[in-house]
Image (cartoon, helix red, strand yellow):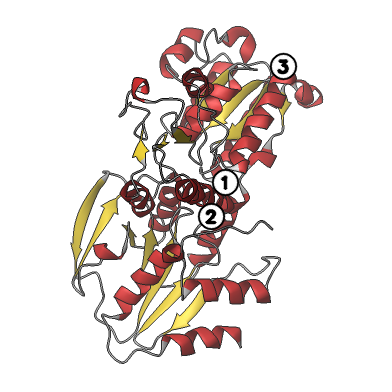
Amino acid sequence: MKKFDIPTYYQSSIISKIKEIRYLKDPRKIDNSPTRLDFGPVIFYVARHFGFCYGVKNAIDIAYKTINENPKKRIYLLSEMIHNPNVNADLQGMNVKFIMDTSGNQIIPWEQLTKEDIVIIPAFGTTLEIENKLNEIGIDPYKYDTTCPFVEKVWNRSSQLGDEESTVIIHGKNTHEETRATFSHSIKNAPSLIVRDLKETEFLVSVILKEKKEEDFYEYFKGKYSKSFDVSKDLQKIGVVNQTTMLASETSAIATLLKGTMIKKYGQEEIEKHFVDTRDTLCYATNDNQNATYTLLKQKADFAIVVGGYNSSNTGHIVELCNEKIKTYFISDSNKIIDKKNISHFDLKNKNEVLTENYLPEKEKIEILLTSGASCPDAEVDRVMLKLLAMFDNTNNIDGVVKQIAN
């Protein structure tokens, strides 16, 4: 296993110990149950898996080494390295500048860059068009590339689908950096189409089964299909890949629906000629975190707290899962816990921050579910836990509670 050099202020004194204890007891991840931390007046149930994944650790490791090793050079990031406000603010504080925003809008004109500058590719990867632009300037786009290996795995699978003369169906958000990058790589070898969810997939099914007209397809999926996409021939053989931060269960459901559609149209005996199974592109970390959330939600509690960046796709999906079962507060950091009466949190549906009063119920023992997104430092989860513990009197000693887990 590769070792990463992560800045100490991202490292945790509480959560890291819990994760280490759980790993030593269960290295094969068979037990997905949450960790119970009984502090007396408040009990936390901490998800089995959450926090920095391999791709995020890799990106942070490369970025900070690049900064430390090049003190006299101008350093740029294409856009946010990961979707965490504190990490990105820290990089900006070290004079790293962002060339684009997360939607791909230009902040710094390409003309201001020179071949002497350093450009770091974020964990989401980037498009072939931007790689070519950097090459034109004289900047090697691969020298400081933090693209997640699991994103590259999706690109490789898309390329294989093209070699097999299949159309690539990408389950993702067409405005997300990762999906834009995947789409750019995919269209090099194959006709490609982005579907956001099951609803859009159901529309695609109606097109495949000729229940809707070809012009309906072009209007409905405008801006989401490759140039010269031909509905009459490019939907005869397909395979599904995904934006790695999407709900794994939804990607599987989309693939199952499309496979069933091709069976309906062409017959079971012909399915291998019309559908390619690509379930191996699901990211292990996304899968682990989401499965841990499902198990966490089996535990009865008063509410859940999810910590992470508001524009983080994987964190948003965890919030969606929690919202279905329990009152959930989505916060970016511990500062959103204002006091014992008030908490400021993000409303995922309306995309705005709201203030909730009296979020802590008046009862003898309060039970809280706690988890975070894959781009959230464990140290921030520590701070959230400590901020909440400070709201209560006569809590049990933290070291003593953590030691009990090891027994």
Q: In this figure, which residue is indicated by the disc labeled 3? A: 165
The type of residue carrying mark 1 is: Ser
- The residue sitting at the right extreme is 269
* Disc 2 packing (10 Å; few <14; some 14–19; many ≥20): many
Tell me, yes or no, whether the two marked residues, 1 and 3, touch with CB atoms within 8 Å: no
**Location of residue 82 with respect to 276 vertically, above or below:** below
Earlier in the chain: of badge 2 and badge 3, it is 3
- Report helix, strand or loop for mark 1: helix
Q: In this figure, which residue is indicated by the disc labeled 1? A: 249
* Disc 3 packing (10 Å; few <14; some 14–19; many ≥20): some
The label on residue 32 is: none
Q: Nearer the viewer, mark 1 or mark 3?
A: 3
Judge from the rendering whether residue 307 lies leftward or rightward of residue 61; answer left or right. left
- Report helix, strand or loop for mark 2: helix
Spatial distance from mark 2 to mark 1, Cα to Cα? 9 Å
Q: In this figure, which residue is indicated by the disc labeled 2? A: 290
Tell me, yes or no, whether the two marked residues, 2 and 3, touch with CB atoms within 8 Å: no
The type of residue carrying mark 2 is: Gln
**Location of residue 108 with respect to 97 vertically, above or below:** above
Report the front residue among 58 and 284: 58
Tell me the residue at 50%/22% (across/down).
Answer: 138
Report the front residue among 378 and 257: 378
Judge from the rendering whether residue 389 lies leftward or rightward of residue 121; answer left or right. left
Q: Position of residue 155 (x, y in %)?
A: 62, 31
Q: Is residue 205 visible?
A: no
Q: Position of residue 175 (x, y in %)?
A: 41, 30
Spatial distance from mark 1 to mark 3, Cα to Cα? 26 Å
**Location of residue 180 with respect to 153 vertically, above or below:** above
Tell me the residue at 34%/38% (across/down).
Answer: 97
Tell me, yes or no, whether the two marked residues, 2 and 1, touch with CB atoms within 8 Å: yes
* Disc 1 packing (10 Å; few <14; some 14–19; many ≥20): few
- Report helix, strand or loop for mark 3: loop
